[in-house]
Amino acid sequence: MADLPGASIRVLVVDDHPLMREGVTAVLSAQEDIAVIGEATSGREAIDSCLALNPDVTLMDLQMPGMDGISAISEIRRHRPDARVLVLTTFNGDVLTLRALKAGACGYLLKSMIRKELVAAIREAHRGRVPLRPEVAAKLGEHALDDQLSARELEVLRRVAAGSPNKVIAAALSLSEETVKSHMKNILSKLKARDRTHAVVIGLERGILDAWPLR
């Protein structure tokens, strides 16, 4: 893809779904000041394309095969500290949002906002601002003071999400069943969950389990 005459904002679109890339490109092609200069389908391709094309703004999906978007953001920012990477995802979990921002994302946008918010967010990012929609900011604020799960509690929750009972989790982690139950009690308290299933649902909604994927 080549630059358009007069276009001042050069954009790289990163998403593993071709229809999503086509949709984003269609929205942006109607703007005189924005040009889509390239596309990538994975985190690794995103890094290579970003370094080769030097876009003004990179739109980055988070859930992709191979290297995920957050890892790609970190790597891009390591090579290009001034890179402007705007997350474009379906996930509004506060944990994923925070991880993306810590990795170096300049903003966080939901795919449901594409038609109404995308163009304005790209322009904001290009001007050096931080596009963070109210819905996303509200999620961050809602859990800002929550106690975080410990590494061991995260491991237990991951295994609960995989369907493992306490006995199996205890054996896998070389713990007693009572210790696993104690960790589970802490998890329920910290997540304000009613039971194990509710804890897993909350973990998925907030991005806790996405941030610590099952292996």
Image (cartoon, rainbow, N blue to C red):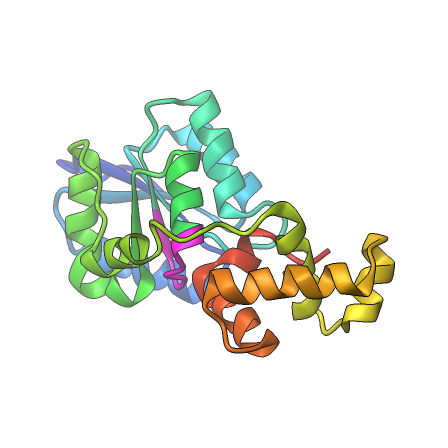
Q: How many marks?
A: 0
Q: To which quarter of the image does residue 114 belong?
A: bottom left
For residue 37, side relative to residue 200 (left or right): left
Give the residue displayed 24% in from the left and 43% down from the top.
35
The x, y position of residue 32, in whole percent, is: 12, 46
Give the residue displayed 65% in from the left and 59% down from the top.
183
Quadrant for the C terminus, please. Answer: bottom right
The x, y position of residue 134, in whole percent, is: 19, 57
Q: Is residue 90 magenta?
A: yes
Give the residue displayed 53% in from the left and 39% down from the top.
71
Using the image as rendered, state which of residue 144 and residue 39 is in the foreground: 144
Residue 203 shows up from this direction: no
The image shows residue 43, relative to residue 141, as above or below, that is above
Using the image as rendered, state which of residue 208 and residue 126 is in the foreground: 208
For residue 200, side relative to residue 89 (left or right): right
Using the image as rendered, state which of residue 147 and residue 62 is in the foreground: 147
For residue 109, side relative to residue 61 (left or right): left
Q: Which residues are magenta?
A: 87-95
The image shows residue 168, relative to residue 138, as above or below, that is below
Residue 88 shows up from this direction: yes
